[in-house]
């Protein structure tokens, strides 16, 4: 009798899920990768789409195309409705039958968290998906169009005030680029002086970029100030409305707020029957499996992984390394070998603030300014999927660098100036 081929189901086509699928390309398994969209997004550059620096197609690739040469992989565009760990079954939202699995890799990532104030999302969208980026771009550009139409000076100033909540990498990168774009558009409008744009970055903690060493955090703070960004630390948002943001009793009049504070794990984690924290992230064993269910692996932003007394950061390199590690342990199981504990190798952290302004942390070695900025450009181009995307991004950035202009300032979808 021919032995049944083990079935590996991967939930999520992000960095971790794609890396796990590719790491199993020569394994004697059949793979089903499930994602609610048909594309993989290079999330570190989402803010470039949100600020009209790149088109969505520049940082996204079809998942089927990425796995087209992998004969043991099947891709399904669907959404998971339930997981039954005891029966080893995944239920899908559509008419597809339930999927039985021998191994499950959950890599469904996280969404932005509003800390119990879900009603704020309508006024302050976050940035986790391509749809989020396009929505932010639309709101950002429409604000200038509305400012051009009004004769009320107070209304114009409120429209030209952009508030970003959260001083992590996303908030810092958005703030710096938005200020630069506003300056670059000064000749595009006749009735509006875009140099009067206020970009306000609010951070609830004592410093921006808290995951970086304090010296680099201070440098980033100063770079933001040099660009004209108003940086407020120890500023806890207490209310978000359609026309204002509140910090305690202080009211900031604005029509445009963007959210970059906190993450909340995908609801999938709570259906695995495993211990999880308040954000929904699942506690995993050293081999990335769920306690009591060694056939289930949780990776990426969905997992809580501790190493040397610290939590492994929720960044793309960590997710990719976890995807490789989960696939490796499946291979070990199939060969009857012991599993190996996951060990994160931090190759460095980078964040860009603006033109020629960036920071890089390589442990004992820190880089700032122009060199860090060029390093950031090089690393992100190299990590993009596909030659076409790399070439397109390189050309867009070269054009912006030489002309100080952004070529994709388009207001698309259902955008009404009202």
Image (cartoon, grey):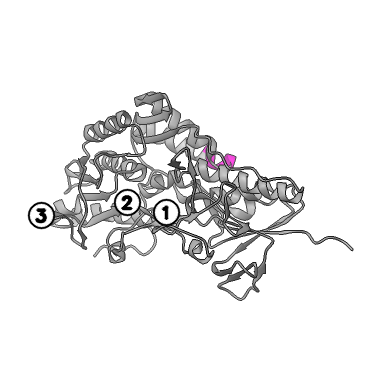
In this view, 111 is above or below 403: below
Mark toward the start of the polypeptide (2 vs 1):
1
Residue at x 56%, y 39% (from the top left corner): 343
- Residue 98: image quadrant is bottom right
Q: What residue is shown with label 2?
A: 261
Considering the numbered disc 2 on the image, is that residue within a helix, a strand or a loop? loop
Which of the numbered marks, if any, corresponds to residue 195? none
Q: Residue furthest bottom?
A: 95
Which of the numbered marks, if any, corresponds to residue 128? 1
**Mark 1, other Cα within 10 Å: few <14 / some 14–19 / many ≥20:** many
**Left or right placement of residue 394 versus residue 26 in this view:** left
Residue at x 24%, y 65% (from the top left corner): 418
Q: Per the image, is 390 magenta? A: yes
Image position, residue 282 (x, y; %) = 49, 56
**Left or right placement of residue 218 versus residue 20 in this view:** left
Q: Residue furthest right?
A: 1
Q: Nearer the viewer, residue 412 or 385?
A: 385
Image position, residue 267 (x, y; %) = 46, 64
**Mark 2, other Cα within 10 Å: few <14 / some 14–19 / many ≥20:** many
Q: What residue is shown with label 3?
A: 154
Foreground label between 2 and 1: 2
Q: Which of 38 and 185 is in front in this view?
A: 38
Foreground label between 1 and 3: 1
Image position, residue 175 (x, y; %) = 29, 43
**Mark 3, other Cα within 10 Å: few <14 / some 14–19 / many ≥20:** few
Image position, residue 211 (x, y; %) = 36, 39
Highlighted magenta segment, given as a residue range: 386-391
Prevailing secondary structure class for the magenta stretch in the rendered image: helix
In this view, 168 is above or below 12: above
């Amino acid at each position: 009798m021919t032995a049944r081929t083990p079935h590996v189901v991967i939930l999520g086509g992000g960095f971790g899920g794609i890396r796990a699928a590719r790491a199993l390309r020569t394994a004697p398994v059949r793979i089903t990768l499930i994602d609610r969209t048909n594309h993989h997004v290079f999330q570190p550059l989402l803010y470039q789409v949100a600020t009209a620096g790149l088109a969505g197609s520049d940082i996204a690739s079809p998942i089927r195309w990425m796995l087209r040469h992998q004969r043991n992989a099947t891709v399904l565009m669907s959404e998971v409705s339930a997981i039954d760990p005891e029966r080893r079954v995944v239920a899908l939202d559509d008419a597809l039958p339930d999927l039985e699995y021998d191994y499950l890799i959950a890599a469904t990532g996280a969404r932005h968290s509003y800390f119990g104030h879900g009603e704020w999302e309508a006024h302050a969208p976050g940035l986790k998906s391509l749809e989020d980026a396009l929505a932010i771009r639309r709101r950002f550009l429409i604000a200038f169009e509305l400012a051009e139409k009004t004769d009320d000076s107070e209304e114009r100033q409120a429209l030209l005030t952009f508030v970003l909540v959260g001083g992590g990498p996303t908030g810092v990168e958005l703030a710096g680029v938005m200020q630069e774009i506003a300056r670059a558009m000064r000749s595009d409008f006749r009735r509006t002086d875009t140099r009067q744009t206020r970009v306000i970055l609010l951070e609830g903690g004592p410093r921006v970029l808290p995951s970086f060493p304090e010296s680099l955090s201070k440098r980033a703070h100063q770079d933001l100030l040099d660009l004209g960004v108003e940086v407020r630390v120890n500023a806890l948002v207490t209310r978000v409305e359609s026309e204002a943001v509140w910090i305690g009793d202080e009211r900031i009049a604005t029509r445009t707020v963007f959210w970059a504070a906190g993450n909340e794990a995908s609801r999938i984690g709570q259906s695995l029957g495993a211990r999880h924290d308040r954000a929904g992230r699942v506690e995993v064993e050293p081999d990335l499996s769920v306690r009591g269910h060694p056939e289930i692996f949780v990776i990426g932003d969905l997992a809580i992984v501790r190493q040397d007394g610290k939590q492994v950061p929720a960044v793309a390199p960590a997710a990719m390394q976890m995807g490789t590690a989960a696939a490796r342990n499946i291979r070990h199981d199939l060969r009857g070998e012991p599993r190996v504990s996951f060990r994160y190798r931090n190759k460095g952290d980078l964040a860009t603030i603006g033109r020629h302004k960036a920071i890089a942390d390589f442990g004992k070695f820190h880089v700032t300014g122009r060199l860090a900025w060029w390093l950031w450009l090089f690393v992100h181009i190299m990590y993009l999927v596909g030659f076409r995307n790399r070439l397109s991004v390189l050309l867009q950035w070269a054009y912006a660098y030489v002309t100080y202009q952004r070529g994709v300032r388009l207001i698309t979808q259902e955008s009404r100036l009202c």
